[in-house]
Amino acid sequence: MSEALFWDSIPVAVYLVLLLWIGFKATRRQADEDEFLLGGRSLTIPAFVATLVATWYGGILGIGEFVYTSGLVAWLVMGVPYYLFALLFALFLAGKIRQADTVSIPDIMYRRYDRKTGLLSGIFIVFMTSPAPYILMLAVLLRYFFHLNLLTAIIISAFFSMVYVYWGGFRSVVQTDKLQFFFMFAGFIVLFFFLVRIDSPVDMFRHLDATHRSLQGDLGWQNILVWFFIASWTFVDPGFNQRCAAAGTPQVARKGIVLSVLFWFAFDTLTILSGLYAFVLLPDIEPLTAYPALANHVLPPFARGLFFVGLFATIMSTIDSYTFLSAMGIGRDILYEFLPRKNEKESNGFVKLGLILTGVIAVIMAWQMPSIVELWYNLGSLFIPPLLLPILGAYLRPFKIKPAVAFLMMSGSFVIGLFFFLWGNLHAVAGSVRYPFGVEPFFPAMIFSLLVFIAAKAFRHSTLRL
């Protein structure tokens, strides 16, 4: 081992030891369903903010890729709309989710609609919360840092992100997220400190090309509009739902989200500026490696290791959360829900079974992952239109609909979006997709959902008049 690698490995080793120690220390013996799935519904504001901020940022290498290739438009599509939708979520949904005393999105769909609607939402949630892309990102980092082969790195990534969750459940996720929160900020603050010693942000901006300085970047306005609406993912995100359900009070959920937006803004500032520095200082590198390559270029030993810990923490905080959410989707919201006789004591066992299945599937899927940014775009386009209005209808009276209408909206919207998606990819020219009429799948899927909603409301009002 070289001297530089030795010093870089010290913060990594300390981080992994602390992570496992904290994760296992949070384990509660004989935890009931509320304790295992929601930590006893006792999150305080600091814990709520730490776990929400850390979990929502797992695609850090994808952010670096986006900034490096497209510039400031990354802030316009990955920052601004998410702040807006998070604040709307805090205002209209956070308190109601806590008051509903449910444990997941499919849980509320089963209660407010019917079995087939709850099952369909559970299937959608499993796809949305797959940890596979984040496991792949962590594996890429491990391979880059320790020179491991990819399969070994993928297995190590999955193991370290799942082992303490299996025993400790949601409480282990939250306690480790506090550690991840600290390291993700510390890593990028260290990187930014060394970057400004090379060049000030003002001078760095002068070296950017017109595309990277533009708020439109290299994206068309239809793409930007789709990205903006994809930020409504916040409303259908099971992580947001779970943390609001786990909050000590509705007020904790609302205030926690508002404070989280401030921390996201601060972290966005660090990550976007760092990505722009990478574009200026390191032309012609692989965009997905923008942050680790930049760290190798400007940081001395030990500081470089601390920055890599920040990247590890940012990704692992999302892997453990998404692994647990996917396990809940498979184990509780699908398998357990369809038992002929339910025993709440068996619920946690099914979630643990779901955790094992999630891990195996994620390791296999990690071999076939496309660009992280492309994956976010496609998942948002396919699953937000079917889920958005039915979820709002489960909590907000103006959006209330009948079970049959909710199922029609969800199934029809998904089929339409999937048709446009498959057509565009099957008719791709030189790797560029060609959607019917040049329309992105998000729009026809969302329009169908809106039309069904409007028609159902109009029919209900006309029936009331009669």
Image (cartoon, grey):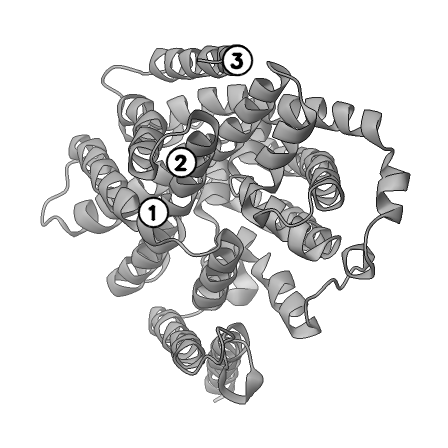
Mark nearer the N terminus (1 vs 2): 2
C-beta proximity under 8 Å, tags 1 and 2: yes
Q: State the separation of the CA atoms marked 1 and 2.
A: 9 Å
Disc 2 target residue: 139
In which quadrant of the rendered image does the N terminus lie? top left
Q: Residues within 10 Å of mark 2 (few under 14, many from 20)?
A: many
Figure quadrant of residue 4:
top right
Lower position in the chain sequence, tag 3 or tag 1? 3
| Residue at 47%, 33% in the rendered image | 144
**Lateral position of residue 359 relative to residue 455, left or right:** left
Q: Give the amino acid at mark 1.
A: Ala
Is 129 on the left-hand or right-hand side of 431? left
- Residue at image position (36%, 41%) is 325
- Above or below, 83 against 32 in this view is below
Residue on which the image places disc 1: 366
- In the image shown, does 347 or 225 lie closer to the viewer? 225
Q: Secondary structure at mark 1?
A: helix
Q: Amino acid at mark 2?
A: Ala
